[in-house]
Image (cartoon, helix red, strand yellow):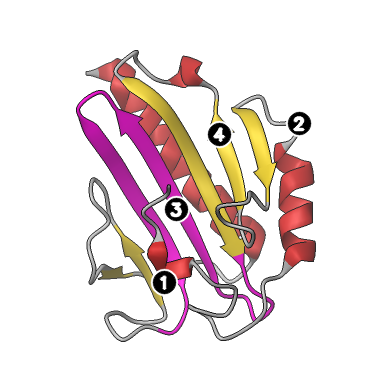
Amino acid sequence: MTGWDECSGSHSVSGAPVDFDRLDVIRNRFATDERFDQIVDRPEFAPERLVCVYDTRFYPSSVQNARVEIVWFENGDFSLHYHEDHEQGTFDHRWDRHPSEHNARDHIHPGPDAPTPGDDLLHPSDWRDVLSMALVEIEARQRAFWEG
């Protein structure tokens, strides 16, 4: 469903267990955030992820839906995958921290197609700052739909 095979197993990317306590904290914070229509905790298709579906009012009608999928590991590694479904295709962007054969530990796979290899980029050390950074970038993308 997601096209995000790199994080399909709980140990597949990081080598560490999924930090479900951290995902619970994130879920609780996002549950009161009006940006999201739905928060899906450990969906059947991805039991190691938190899936946060954006309210469609932030998008033009050509964007059918948008979500950010979050997996966090006990060693501080993570992958945040932002995905949009459009009438004519998709948009994907990922922020990652994990061991990699294609990039440095901290990297992004930029939109529109999140290519591998991505771009090396140092992420903040605190998990809250990582989330804030990603949400600010997503918000800038949302604003750009209406500015142009």
Question: Which of the labelled discs sits on residue 81, or is there none?
Answer: 3
Whole-number angstrom distance, CA of label 4 to CA of label 3: 12 Å
How many numbered circles are shown? 4
Whole-number angstrom distance, CA of label 3 to CA of label 2: 21 Å
Q: Is residue 115 above or below residue 9?
A: above
Residue 66 included in the magenta stretch of the image: no
Residue 93 included in the magenta stretch of the image: yes
Mark 4 closeness class: few <14, some 14–19, many ≥20 residues within 10 Å: many
Hey, which quadrant is residue 128 in on the image? bottom right
Whole-number angstrom distance, CA of label 1 to CA of label 3: 17 Å
Question: Of tags 2 and 1, which is closer to the observer?
Answer: 2
Question: Which of the labelled discs sits on residue 122, or is there none?
Answer: 1
Kind of residue at badge 1: Leu
Question: Of tags 3 and 2, which is closer to the observer?
Answer: 3
Question: Which of the labelled discs sits on residue 32, or is there none?
Answer: 2
Kind of residue at badge 2: Thr
Earlier residue among tags 1 and 3: 3
Secondary element at tag 3? strand
Q: Which residue is mark 4?
A: 53
Kind of residue at badge 3: His
132 horizontally vs 30: left or right: left
Hey, which quadrant is residue 48 in on the image? bottom right
Give whichever of 72, 147 is nearer the camera: 72
In contact (CB < 8 Å): disc 2 and disc 4? no
Which residue extends farthest front?
44
Earlier residue among tags 4 and 3: 4
Mark 2 closeness class: few <14, some 14–19, many ≥20 residues within 10 Å: few
Q: Is residue 140 above or below residue 93?
A: above
Whole-number angstrom distance, CA of label 1 to CA of label 4: 26 Å
Q: What range is drawn magenta here?
A: 72-99
